[in-house]
Image (cartoon, rainbow, N blue to C red):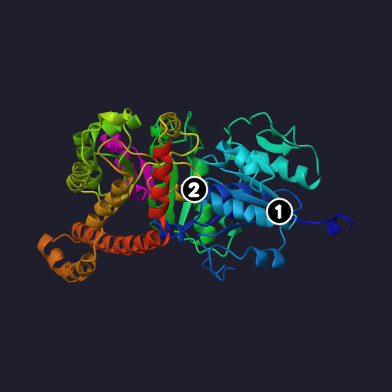
């Protein structure tokens, strides 16, 4: 009887809101981040703890929304007081909002912790001086099981691996925790812990780490894998508990473990046949996997319909700077292979990537834009995303640009602008930051247009004629659907660009940029 009266504790993990409307806002409103859900699922199994996830970018079901931005945390604390707040610090542009919320909860007397490889883990001192009590370094699933009980018991933290905290005026970093190898022992992600969200696309993962060595990325190290059986179990659980149909496999490079990936695809195809239901998957994959015809065939049978490919740039010098050793013409040919296999191809690009030597630039901004447009057209890419280079903390790119004295100071251009939509450093010769900013709008503005609204009507009326012409319902449907779907998305992309342009003008970023350039020239 005494055990029943013991106090229960609550952990609330928060995914901070984007600072403003951007090109990610639409998809963020339909999905959530996998990391916070995975950590919450582990914490939920700790005796005496209740756990919830609040994703401020997805508050669609009766959410306690703040009219300005994100969630109303004063209301949340009133109806369900949290004892410890965890923050997802993996998206650099959300860090100012994270610090704002951390300071709010500190005033409420609530303990705060934060983790996230892309930012917090590389900016420990800043985080600890901005309302965070404990920073979790590296993967959090095993650390959280030890950290939560220690915090509520007010026990010393020096024996807990993988944390950093401030003791008087000194920052203490405990011994690093080993990377997780045994994924079978981790609980399946429990998306029921995400409150107020309406999730349409579920993020899932089998592989951590990446064998590539891209200069602009923090994800490094030898890949580690869960078994295909475990991965299928995760997907089955989400289908059965959430009636899910759409999934995004967030692994940096799908197919890194080729034979096991093919085995997984076959298992996934068998599962869908068994339940008589077709699922839809999007994956991130290397371009050169197009050479593996067996892999592509099994992927299609498994319901993988869209591939997101990091083309990065059609300019050879930029590819060399990124450590991507492939020729633009080869990229076009490989992209067409994916298309022939029936995949929808989403192309991800970085415009204006800085050369190793700032002074070797020979292409004008006009020529660069032309090369991007020509490449996208020749490669027959279905949808595109063009961003500017982001010198993220902890990357080789940031280290290089800082040594060259090219990165604008955080005081002038804050972390909230680190989402790929804004120029963050002095560009190469023949380019200006303002031109970079306008160029990504020109490239995507040429691709996403209002006229595709009218194309939707055309495709609807052309459907019967196309089937009659081809005398093949299956083939006709595939050709028609691709054209109709792309017209729909390109019209939708036009509305997103229009919203982003409006948000950009309201942000007064142009004034900030001019001020940053003045300070930079003075130095």
For disc 1, the marked residue is 106
Q: Is residue 289 magenta?
A: yes
Query: Element under label 1?
Result: helix
Q: Is residue 179 magenta?
A: no
Q: Quadrant of the C terminus?
A: top left
Residue 452 in percent (x, y) is at 22, 65
Neighbourhood count class around disc 2 (C-alpha, 10 Å): few under 14, some 14–19, many 20 upward = some
For disc 2, the marked residue is 414
Horizontal side, residue 298 vs residue 152: left or right:
left
Q: Quadrant of the N terminus?
A: bottom right
What residue appears at the point 35 percent right and 45 percent down from the top-left corner?
388
Residue 270 in percent (x, y) is at 41, 48
Chain-order first, disc 1 or disc 2: 1
Residue segment shown in magenta: 282-307
Horizontal side, residue 452 vs residue 66: left or right:
left
Horizontal side, residue 151 vs residue 212: left or right:
right
What residue appears at the point 57 percent right and 65 percent down from the top-left corner?
196
Neighbourhood count class around disc 1 (C-alpha, 10 Å): few under 14, some 14–19, many 20 upward = some
> Which callout, 1 or 2, points to the residue nearer the camera?
2
Q: Which mark is residue 461?
A: none
Query: Element under label 2?
Result: loop
């Amino acid at each position: 009887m005494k055990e029943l009266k013991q106090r229960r504790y609550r952990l609330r993990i928060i995914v901070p809101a984007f600072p403003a409307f951007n090109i990610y806002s639409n998809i963020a409103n339909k999905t959530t981040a996998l990391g916070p859900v995975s950590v919450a699922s582990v914490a939920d199994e700790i005796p005496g703890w209740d756990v919830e996830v609040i994703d401020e970018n997805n508050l669609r079901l009766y959410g306690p929304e703040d009219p300005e931005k994100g969630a109303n945390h004063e209301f949340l604390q009133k109806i369900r007081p949290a004892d410890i707040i965890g923050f997802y610090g993996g998206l650099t542009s959300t860090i100012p909002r994270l610090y704002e919320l951390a300071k709010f909860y500190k005033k409420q007397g609530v303990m705060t912790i934060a983790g996230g490889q892309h930012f917090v883990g590389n900016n420990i001192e800043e985080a600890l001086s901005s309302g965070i009590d404990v920073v979790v370094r590296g993967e959090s699933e095993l650390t959280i099981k030890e950290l939560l009980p220690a915090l509520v018991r007010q026990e010393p933290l020096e024996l807990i691996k993988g944390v950093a905290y401030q003791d008087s005026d000194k920052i203490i970093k405990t011994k690093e925790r080993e990377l997780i190898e045994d994924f079978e022992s981790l609980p399946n992600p429990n998306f029921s812990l995400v409150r107020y969200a309406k999730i349409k696309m579920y993020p899932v993962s089998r592989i951590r780490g990446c064998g590539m060595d891209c200069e602009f990325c923090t994800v490094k190290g030898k890949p580690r894998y869960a078994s295909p059986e475990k991965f299928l179990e995760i997907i089955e659980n989400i289908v059965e508990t959430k009636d899910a149909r759409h999934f995004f496999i967030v692994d940096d490079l799908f197919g890194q473990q080729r034979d096991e990936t093919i085995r997984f695809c076959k298992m996934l195809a068998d599962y869908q046949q068994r339940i008589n239901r077709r699922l839809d998957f999007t994956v991130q994959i290397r371009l050169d996997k197009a050479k593996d015809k067996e892999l592509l065939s099994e992927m299609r049978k498994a319901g993988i319909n869209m591939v997101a490919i990091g083309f990065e740039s059609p300019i050879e010098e930029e590819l060399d700077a990124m450590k991507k050793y492939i020729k633009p013409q080869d990229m076009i040919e490989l992209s067409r292979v994916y298309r022939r296999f029936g995949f929808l191809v989403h192309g991800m690009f970085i415009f204006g990537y800085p050369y190793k030597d700032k002074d070797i630039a020979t292409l004008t901004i006009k020529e660069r834009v032309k090369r991007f447009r020509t490449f996208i057209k020749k490669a027959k890419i279905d949808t595109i995303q063009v961003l500017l280079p982001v010198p993220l903390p902890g990357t080789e790119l940031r280290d290089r640009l800082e040594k060259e004295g090219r990165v604008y100071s955080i005081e002038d251009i804050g972390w909230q602008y680190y989402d790929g939509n804004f120029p963050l450093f002095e560009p190469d010769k023949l380019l200006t930051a303002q031109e970079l900013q306008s160029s990504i709008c020109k490239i995507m503005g040429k691709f996403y247009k209002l006229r595709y609204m009218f194309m939707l009507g055309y495709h609807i009326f052309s459907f019967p004629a196309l089937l009659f012409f081809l005398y093949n319902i299956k083939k006709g449907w595939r050709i028609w659907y691709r054209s109709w779907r792309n017209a729909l998305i390109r019209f939708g992309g036009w509305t997103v660009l229009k919203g982003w342009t409006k948000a950009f003008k309201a942000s007064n970023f142009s004034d900030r940029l001019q001020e940053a350039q003045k300070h930079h020239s003075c130095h």
